[in-house]
Image (tube, rainbow, N blue to C red):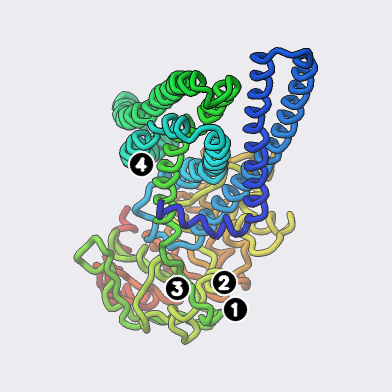
Amino acid sequence: MRHLMQLNPYFKRYAHLLCFGILCVATSTVLATYQGVIIRNLTNAVCNSTPKTHSIFIYGFLQILGLALLSGVFMFLMRQTIIVMSRHIEYDQKNQLYLKFQELKPQQIQTYTTGDLMNRIAEDVSRVRMYTGPAIMYIVNTIVTVITVLIFMLSISSSLTLLVFLPLPLLSIFIYKISIQIQKLSHKSQSDLGLITSKAQESFNAIRLIKAYAMERETQIEMQQQSEAYRKSAVALAFRESLFGPLMTLMIGLSVWLTIWQGGILLSKHQIEPGNITEFILYVFRLTWPFASIGWVSALIQRASASQERINTLLHLPTPDANDAKRSIMEFESIEFKNLSYNYPETPHAALHNITMSISKNSIIGITGPMGSGKSTWVNIITGQLACSDNSLFLNNMCVNTVKQRNWRDIISIVPQDIFLFSDTIFENIAFGAIQNVSQSEIIEAAKIAQLHDTVMQFKDGYQTLVGERGVMLSGGQKQRLAIARALVRKSKVLILDDCINALDHVTEQALMQRLKHMNRFECIIIISHRLTQIQHTQCIYYFEQGSITECGTHQDLLDKQGSYAQLYALQNEL
């Protein structure tokens, strides 16, 4: 239950709906319970038949009808307040989670699968809504019903009331023990469901690879194994929850039998009237649903607690840039590395070691080196995807850890190695990179620079062509050019191309590089590539090897040194 305390701010926000809903619950319950008094009077009228019995029945029927209508109205208002409140909380929670996802750094959530994150924002939030809505509504209904019925019962016979409520302590013990098991099983069930969601998403995204390697059967077996694990946990959970219903029925049946048995004894002693027995039976049945719902509500609470715990683990992750005193950057002047080193938590060796370099305004820089030399780590640090130690990276002569990342990212356009395209039109995918609203002419201009415009115009729908899931309708080169156009339309100060044009043919590559070289839009261009033809005309080239910069200089300077760069250049020219 302590995990559900996280919801208190929401309850305060919608206190007006909650309070009015509770008032409606109480009013509806009292009106419905008072019908027992009318039933008692009608029963006594039958037993004591008089000439006025007929008129008493008509009057009693009208009273019951009026109370039922009023009770129904307040029950409707109850749902329109408490259930609506739960929908508002669900909406706010999903927005809060999504905003949290946007604020977190990649390394903070890299231990979670995509399916698990989707499950938390969808399934877990929905289960919490069942607590903030139906569970709270029925908890209030049960409490008010028990108090109201207890008052009416005690006014008739305290001994009979005590006998009817005798089974309740045993019921409470049973519910407590089962609820603990339900919470554990619910947590496991949600985790298993997250694994299934993640596996299904991976299979959908990799369907071409699965078919190419004829791995359909193996993939199906893995999915069946995960589904079987979820089935077992779900069945075990359903079994625990199913124990509540029969116990409720047994308790109500026992209470009715005790009412008739003890009521008959009291009636024979003239301590109660015949109508009191029917009134008591009605009250017992009034308690049927509240007590029957105890098990269901208890299961809802335990499920919600397990789900809220999973949600809290994400919400409690520290958010970068929490310090409002951090400085802003609006222009680009320089980037400087001073003995920067970086270790990934799970690896003993440094990915980067003593990196010292300076990138000034109006420069074009090339970065190259063998695979695993630290180039991608360097890019992730410079774009704020990975955190570095203090006084190792300076932006405009300010330590990066004192600068607001949002401002820094606003002046950077990056085309990553792993290009992601949305299942939308070419136009919308390019426009996604714009910081502000962008016109169609600007989209077309960016596409022309990226050597994409002529290709797009060959499509039937032009820029309104749908690219499919992750750009499945486009070739590798078309995806890369679209991603470059997206970065160009952003109108930022720094452009970073992270080994993102290797799928282009030589002619298209040269045309693109020439256009980029003569652009005045960017104040700095950084090109990371294995193909030296893409960086040989840059002003300075840095050669990475085993996490360190082993060579730097112009293309000709590095050839004259006859080092690793020259060997790589000779090898590529031979090929």
- Whole-angstrom CA distance, mark 2 to mark 3, is 17 Å
- Whole-angstrom CA distance, mark 1 to mark 3, is 21 Å
- Which structural element holds mark 1? loop
- Amino acid type at mark 4: Gln
- Amino acid type at mark 2: Ile
Residue occupying image coordinates x 56% and y 46%: 422
Residue 365, label in figure: 3
Residue occupying image coordinates x 48% and y 18%: 264
Answer with the quarter of the image where residue 567 lies.
Answer: bottom left
Residue occupying image coordinates x 43% and y 83%: 399
Label 4, on which residue?
A: 183
- Amino acid type at mark 1: Met
First of labels 1, 4 by sequence position: 4
Q: Position of residue 569 (x, y in %)?
A: 32, 63
Q: Position of residue 304 (x, y in %)?
A: 45, 44
Q: Kindly tell me whether residue 412 is visible in this rendering.
A: yes
Most extreme residue toward the left is 348
Residue 228 located left or right of residue 159? left
Q: Is residue 553 above or below residue 290?
A: below
First of labels 2, 3 by sequence position: 3
- Which structural element holds mark 4? helix
- Whole-angstrom CA distance, mark 2 to mark 1, is 7 Å
Q: Position of residue 145 (x, y in %)?
A: 56, 37
Label 2, on which residue?
A: 411
Residue 330, label in figure: 1
First of labels 3, 4 by sequence position: 4
- Amino acid type at mark 3: Ile
Q: Kindly tell me whether residue 199 is visible in this rendering.
A: no
- Whole-angstrom CA distance, mark 3 to mark 4, is 56 Å
Q: Nearer the viewer, mark 1 or mark 3?
A: 1
Answer with the quarter of the image where residue 67 lies.
Answer: top right
- Whole-angstrom CA distance, mark 4 to mark 2, is 48 Å
